[in-house]
Amino acid sequence: MTASVRIIGIDPGLRRTGWGVIESEGVRLAFVASGTVSSNPKHALSDRLRDLFDGLTAVVNEWCPAEAAAEQTFVNRDAGATLKLGQARGIALLVPAIAGVPVAEYAPNMVKKTVVGSGHADKTQIRAMIGHLLPRATPDSDDAADALAVAVTHAHHRDWNARTAAAAALAESVR
C-alpha cells in the first residue's frame, strides 16, 4: 500500500501565480484546494514580489504540502518580461524551500503532454482534463488550473525523479 502524499503545484506569474494542492496515493489523485495569488501591476516590482511571497507563504502554511512542483519559465522574445517572470518564479521556488518542502520543476510542454497527451495543448484543453482527472476541482482561474496540472505531472513523475536522484547519488559515492 502506498502512502498518501500532499503535493502543491505552482504556476508562477508576476500578475497572477496559480497554486493547486492534490493528494496522491499510488495512481489515485484527489483535489484538495486551488487558487490564485495576485499582485497589483501598478505597484513597484519589489512590492509585487512581496505580495506573491506573502500569498504563497500563507498557502503553504495552510495546506502543509510534503512536496512541491513549479512550472519552468519559457524564454520569449521580450527579455524584460522573461526576467520579471523569472523573478516571480524565484518566489515560487523559494517559498516551499523555506518551509523545507522539496521542489521539482517541469517544462510547460511536459506538463501539457502529461495531462492532455499533447505538448502543445491550450488552456481550454488543460482545464477540461483537470476537470476529468480531478472532478471535484474548482480552479478560480486558468493559472490555478495550470498549477493543478503541474501537481498532477509531479504525481506521475515523482517516483522516476526519486529513482534518478538515487542513481545519481550512488554514482557520485562510487567516484
Image (cartoon, rainbow, N blue to C red):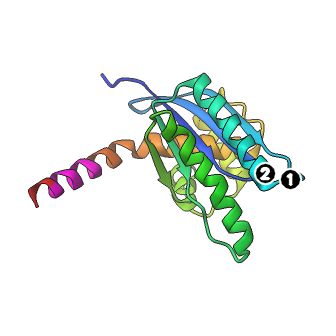
Q: Amino acid at mark 2?
A: Arg
Dot 1 falls on a residue whose secondary structure is loop
Q: Position of residue 122 (x, y in %)?
A: 69, 58
Where does the C terminus fall, quadrant-wise? bottom left
Please give the name of the residue rendered at 33% of the width and 25% of the height, measured from the top-left corner: 2
Question: Magenta part of the protein: which range?
Answer: 164-172
Residue 139 in view of the camera: yes
Out of 27 and 84, give the one closest to the viewer: 84
Q: Quadrant of residue 80?
A: bottom right
**Residue drawn 74% across and 38% down?**
36
Q: Which residue is mark 1?
A: 41
Q: Amino acid at mark 1?
A: Pro
Dominant secondary structure of the magenta stretch?
helix
> Badge 2, how many Cα within 10 Å: few under 14, some, many 20+?
some
Q: Is residue 14 above or below residue 76?
A: above
Above or below, comparing residue 72 to residue 99 in the picture: below
Q: CA distance from mark 1 to mark 2?
A: 7 Å
* Picture residue at 49% right of the left edge, 41% below the top: 97
Question: How many neighbours does mark 1 have within 10 angstroms: few (below 14), some (14-19), or many (20 or more)?
Answer: few
Q: Which residue lies under the disc numbered 2?
A: 15
User: Marks 1 and 2: CB-CB under 8 Å?
Assistant: yes
Residue 170 is covered by the magenta coloring: yes
Residue 29 visible in rendering: no
> Residue farthest to the right?
42
Q: Position of residue 98 (x, y in %)?
A: 51, 37
